[in-house]
Image: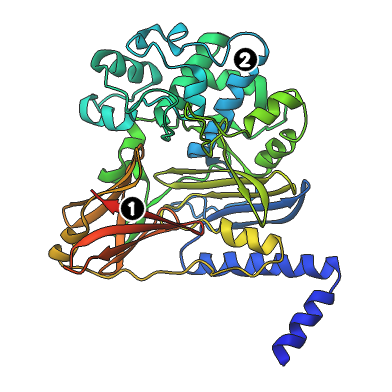
């Protein structure tokens, strides 16, 4: 009876009381995650442009012990792609390129791929293989690579595409790095200069810029250094100093798929501009959040630099995640209800509580808050039992491998990340809030798994 009375009082409470309750729930959730070592960064939550919650958790610099604040500057990782896409669309609007132009018009070195267009790159439907995997095997890692180096590798080795353009969606860092080079050719400016001129300066995003910290180091006030956790030393270290994450050094000069740096307050300015015609006319802006249509008529869930979902509870939601050693980022925009969630973190073994924040924002019960998971040690035989390739859908596979006692998971087109056992058949990632549930058949063999993330449960059969 007491529960019903409390619920009834809550339902009768006015908007101000409900809003305060939401703020308390958000703060309690994030404070608990930070205390458990699962959150280190900045969060901003807004409704119709009004900030209802903004807070910083943890340190910007593990050496000096400088704390994060709302003006701390973070590497956005793949959340940079939305700016690359907007740069292309602005050039199209000014007549300096067309979305259906072949990429070879701007990058003739890629003549091996005559049928791939700018639109294919924007939509992740080009079929181009991942440049990181290719360069890891052939590139001289004593030199910091730039986009020109990446293009030269593709020109020299001419790797085959994974599929014909517009027949499949496959997330591609390669595509967005090439788009940065298209921007440079069409604009006559560097990628960073063009984004400053066309986007950041007009929107007064004064703390946002393209930054390649190892290739072109400079003093950045209030910089949030990204850290990974060294299990051997039991300490947070810069990824530059950890063997497994040294690619942050030799890939540092490649831009377009990452390297935009910003703050939560600047990103709210960006969010507000996307509701206006300040950058693009209304019709062109609609196309930004329109999912691609493949040759067979099916729709993907990706527009121009944004994942787009239609949900029963929250309407249309445009979002993007970012992950790079030391950084975990998330931007989410509720297009029908004008709500915004911005999460920037500078530790690797953290969670993204966007799903919980979403439910709290709508005064809905949170269906299972993020858990703090406990890692156990498996025998080599138990680890080996789950290795293999699992198909989520045609063209999208999850490879589970074992290397030097550590199990890794690698989704098609992405890097391999370590996974950790909570039980013999249940593993979790530390870089994102995702889990893998393996299943055995009657003979005791692992034959499939389920990928659990953001409330989704995707089955994958072992090949």
Q: Residue at x 32, y 36 (%)?
A: 247
Q: Residue at x 33, y 18 (%)?
A: 149
Between 75 and 119, which is closer to the camera in this rendering?
119
Between 261 and 219, which is closer to the camera in this rendering?
261
For label 2, the crowd category at 10 Å Cα-Cα, with few meaning under 14, some 14 to 19 and many 20 or more, is some
Is residue 224 visible in this depiction of the protein?
yes
Q: Which mark is residue 411?
A: none
- Which residue position holds label 1? 460
CB atoms at circles 1 and 2 under 8 Å apart? Answer: no
Q: Residue at x 78, y 77 (%)?
A: 10
In the picture, residue 82 is in which quadrant? top right
Q: Is residue 129 above or below residue 181?
A: below
Q: Is residue 63 left or right of residue 129?
A: right
Q: Is residue 243 above or below residue 183?
A: below
- Which residue position holds label 2? 91
Q: Is residue 49 left or right of residue 313?
A: right
Q: Residue at x 73, y 33 (%)?
A: 273
Which x, y percent locates residue 251?
35, 30
For label 1, the crowd category at 10 Å Cα-Cα, with few meaning under 14, some 14 to 19 and many 20 or more, is many
């Amino acid at each position: 009876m007491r529960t019903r009375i409390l619920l009834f009082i809550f339902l009768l409470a006015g908007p101000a009381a409900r809003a305060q309750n939401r703020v308390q729930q958000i703060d309690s959730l994030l404070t608990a995650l930070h205390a458990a070592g699962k959150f280190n960064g900045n969060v901003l939550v807004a409704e119709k442009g009004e900030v209802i919650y903004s807070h910083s958790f943890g340190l910007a610099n593990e050496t000096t012990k400088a704390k994060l604040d709302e003006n701390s500057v973070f590497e956005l990782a793949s959340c940079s792609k939305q700016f690359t896409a907007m740069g292309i669309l602005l050039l199209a609007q000014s007549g300096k390129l067309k979305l259906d132009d072949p990429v070879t018009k701007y990058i003739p070195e890629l003549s091996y791929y005559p049928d791939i267009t700018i639109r294919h790159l924007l939509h992740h439907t080009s079929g181009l293989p991942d440049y990181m995997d290719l360069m890891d095997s052939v590139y001289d890692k004593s030199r910091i690579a730039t986009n020109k180096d990446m293009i030269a590798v593709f020109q020299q080795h001419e790797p085959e595409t994974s599929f014909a353009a517009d027949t499949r969606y496959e997330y591609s860092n390669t595509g967005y790095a090439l788009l940065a080079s298209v921007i440079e050719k069409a604009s006559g400016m560097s990628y960073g200069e063009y984004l400053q001129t066309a986007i950041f300066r007009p929107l007064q995003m004064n703390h946002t810029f393209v930054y390649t910290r190892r290739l072109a180091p400079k003093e950045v006030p209030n910089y949030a250094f990204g850290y990974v956790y060294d299990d051997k030393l039991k300490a947070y270290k810069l990824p530059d100093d950890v063997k497994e994450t040294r690619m942050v050094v030799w890939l540092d000069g490649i831009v377009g798929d990452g390297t935009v740096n910003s703050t939560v307050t600047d990103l709210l300015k960006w969010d507000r501009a996307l509701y206006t015609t300040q950058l693009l006319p209304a019709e062109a802006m609609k196309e930004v959040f329109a999912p691609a249509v493949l040759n067979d008529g099916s729709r993907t869930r990706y527009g121009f630099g944004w994942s787009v979902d239609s949900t029963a509870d929250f309407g249309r939601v445009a979002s993007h995640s970012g992950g790079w050693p030391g950084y975990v980022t998330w931007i989410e925009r509720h297009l029908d209800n004008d709500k915004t969630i911005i999460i920037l973190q500078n530790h690797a073994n953290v969670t993204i509580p966007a799903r919980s924040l979403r439910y709290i924002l709508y005064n809905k019960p949170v269906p299972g808050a993020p858990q703090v998971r406990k890692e156990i040690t498996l025998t080599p035989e138990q680890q080996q039992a789950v290795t293999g390739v699992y198909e989520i859908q045609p063209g999208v596979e999850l490879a589970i491998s074992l290397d030097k006692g550590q199990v890794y998971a690698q989704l098609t087109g992405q890097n391999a990340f370590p996974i950790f056992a909570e039980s013999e058949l249940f593993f979790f990632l530390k870089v994102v809030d995702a889990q893998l549930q393996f299943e055995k058949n009657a003979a005791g063999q692992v034959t499939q798994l389920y990928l659990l993330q953001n409330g989704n449960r995707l089955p994958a059969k072992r090949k």
